């Protein structure tokens, strides 16, 4: 049964209206687009801007339509893949900097300061 009053402001509304003219409440949930263009946008957001794709994924998963649900599932899979790649990349960067920091060990610093004591920098010419 379609509501004959707005669920938010209780003003009378007509079945054919998509929005309540009084408060702007959405009266009919419009079916989500499953066009190729829309899918590409959702997949791109899921992969390149995690976790923002999850908003779409959850909305699409809640639909009864199988195709719409599948878009939600693919979106979640892409989000997980993307986060996985991010973790692997970050780990690689961390390993790189850990090695870099380990190469500056205390032994090198001691040798440098000894050299400074043995041969002080030349005095500026008078
Ligand atoms: Zn209303």
Image (cartoon, rainbow, N blue to C red):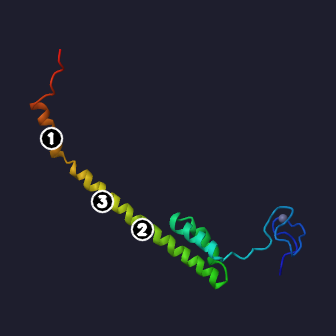
- Whichever of callouts 2 and 1 sits on the residue coming sooner in the sequence is 2
Q: Which residue is mark 2?
A: 85
Please tell me which residue is depicted at 55% across the width and 68% down the height of the picture.
44
Residue at image position (35%, 62%) is 91
Image position, residue 108 (x, y; %): 16, 44
Q: Which mark is residue 95?
A: 3
Disc 1 element: helix
| Sequence-first disc among 3 and 2 | 2
Which residue position is annotated with label 1?
Answer: 110
Left or right: 81 in relation to 121: right
Relative to 110, residue 70 above or below: below
Q: Quadrant of the N terminus?
A: bottom right
Question: Which sits in the foreground, 90 or 39?
Answer: 39
Q: CA distance from mark 3 to mark 2?
A: 15 Å
Instruction: Bin the neighbour count of mark 2 within 10 Å (Cα to Cα): few under 14, some 14-19, many 20 and up.
Output: few
Circle 2/circle 1 CB separation < 8 Å: no
Q: Callout 1: few (<14), some (14-19), or many (20+) C-alpha neighbours within 10 Å? A: few
Q: Mark 1 or mark 3: name the one nearer the start of the chain.
A: 3
Helix, strand or loop under label 2: helix
Image quarter for ligand 1: bottom right
- The x and y percentages for residue 124 are 18, 20
Q: Is mark 3 within 8 Å of ligand 1?
A: no
Q: Residue at x 9, y 31 (%)?
A: 118
Specify the farthest residue to the top: 126
Residue 83 badge = none
Question: Could you classify mark 3 by the number of other residues whose Cα lies within 10 Å: few (under 14), some (14-19), or many (20 or more)?
Answer: few
* Above or below, 43 relative to 120: below
Q: Dividing the image into 4 quarters, which one contains the C terminus?
A: top left
Q: Quadrant of residue 8?
A: bottom right
């Amino acid at each position: 049964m379609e509501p004959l009053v707005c669920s938010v402001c209780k003003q009378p509304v007509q079945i054919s209206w998509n929005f309540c003219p009084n408060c702007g409440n959405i009266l009919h949930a419009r079916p989500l687009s499953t066009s190729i263009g829309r899918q590409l946008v959702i997949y791109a957001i899921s992969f390149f801007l995690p976790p923002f794709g999850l908003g779409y994924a959850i909305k699409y998963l809640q639909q009864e339509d199988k195709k719409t649900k599948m878009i939600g599932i693919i979106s979640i899979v892409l989000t997980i893949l993307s986060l996985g790649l991010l973790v692997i990349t970050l780990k690689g960067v961390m390993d790189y900097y850990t090695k870099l920091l380990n190469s500056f060990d205390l032994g090198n610093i001691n040798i440098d300061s000894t050299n400074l004591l043995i041969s002080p920098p030349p005095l500026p010419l008078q």
